[in-house]
Image: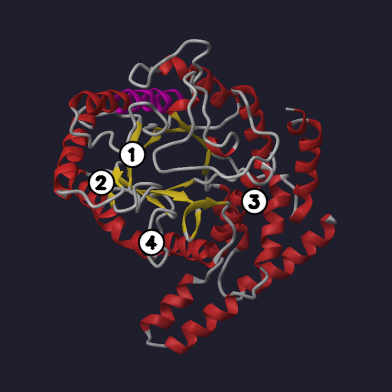
Amino acid sequence: MNEQNILSAYQIAKERFAAFGVDTDKVLEQLDKISLSLHCWQADDVTGFENQGGSLSGGIQVTGNYPGRARNIDELRADILKATSLIGGKHRLSLHEIYGEFGDKFVDRDEVTVEHFKGWIDWGKANDMKLDFNSTSFSHPKSGDLTLANPDKEIRDFWIRHTKACRAIANEMGKAQGDPSMMNLWVHDGSKEVPANRLRYRAILEESLDEIFATPYQWMKDCIEAKLFGIGLENYTVGSYDFYLGYGAKKGKIVTLDTGHFHLTESIPDKVSSLLLFTPEIMLHVSRPVRWDSDHVVILSDELLELAREIVRCNALDKVHIGLDYFDATINRIGAYVIGCRATQKAFLRALLEPQDILNKYEDNGQLFQRLALQEELKSMPWQSVWDMYCLKSNVPVGDAYIPEIEKYEAEVTSKR
């Protein structure tokens, strides 16, 4: 796209938004400060680098077999850097525990240490990319249907040791990068049918969490993630939203809102303002559910727009951590990264361009017609010209120009794997 055309279109957009008191230059600065935490598992279909084989289990699955999956850590890192080269701003990387550098040695999950992630820490520093972390309770011989909520003490203690180790690793990551690592805890624990006693398992999970969180850390933040159900575990999930909301509010932990982990009729944006009142911060896992927790590639949907608007309206960009969480193996995996990241950025751009002062004034004065009318007119304001300017200033492809970049990378790199 011609640079002069971008500049000319931006100037027109700038003037139009200025009529509503919105400074687009300031908005571009705000957008550039929003860091997304990219999910490492999109590049390799949640395979990881453990040496114990096996397939995905624990109520999750990845569909598709598009050529070019990252087969090792070097390929994974190269793919992530390629994706971030097409996305404006500075972003983070979210690692699952199974993505450590284990070499040829078998390291069980309760034996993992920060030494297995020294390479990632060094790589993050070299590429100015901060790291977040996740414990991994699925796809393991001891996973079964229950981990931290398992009545079997031997199995439960194994997963407690694993999660404690992950917290320690996350703390070392945060210390090394001078910024706390977000440590996300999600377990798939549940039952295909309704159990004889729901409370029993939730009481066990609470006890496990209390033991895990007993050690305080400075350089990591604990996040607890709920889920509606898992494949094969449809009737009962121990770590439901109600469970983790209660635990987070009571114990001062960050509740993770995964946009694919709720019933499709629930409003995740509506939960944001409530959580901000009773929990210290919020962790987001932005996904796109289709009929179930299918983790489709994030697109610029009405749901995503409303989520971004709610965060901006609450003035909570400093309290909400934005991570992506989807995996699509039916299309080019780097393309999936770029589509999802840019869609998320567009949603926050549109939210930042809203004239909140005017909308609030209308509401305070009872001018509800005017409020709705302006909200409708904003939908056709030239936000796309502001987005193009952001891409230009960020030195990343404008419009669809990233498509041939990814096609070239596929032809030269991923297609040869």
Q: Is residue 13 left or right of residue 219?
A: right
Q: In the rendered view, tell whether residue 168 sits above or below residue 353.
A: above
Whether residue 93 is visible here, answered yes or no, is yes
Disc 4 or disc 3, which is closer to the eye? 4
* Disc 2/disc 4 C-alpha distance (Å): 16 Å
Question: Helix, strand or loop at disc 2?
Answer: loop
| Mark nearer the N terminus (1 vs 2) | 1
Dot 2 amino acid type: Val
**Which segment is the magenta one?**
163-177
* Res. 339 mark: 3
Determine contact: label 2, label 4, CB under 8 Å. no
- Residue 404 x %, y %: 81, 46
Residue at (58%, 51%) from the top-left corner?
297
* Disc 4/disc 1 C-alpha distance (Å): 18 Å
Residue picked out by circle 4: 263
Residue picked out by circle 2: 238
Q: Quadrant of the C terminus?
A: top right
Residue picked out by circle 1: 187
Dot 4 amino acid type: His
Number of other residues with Cα within 10 Å of mark 4, as a class: few under 14, some 14 to 19, many 20 or more: some
Dot 1 amino acid type: Val
| Mark nearer the N terminus (1 vs 3) | 1
- Residue 115 x %, y %: 44, 14
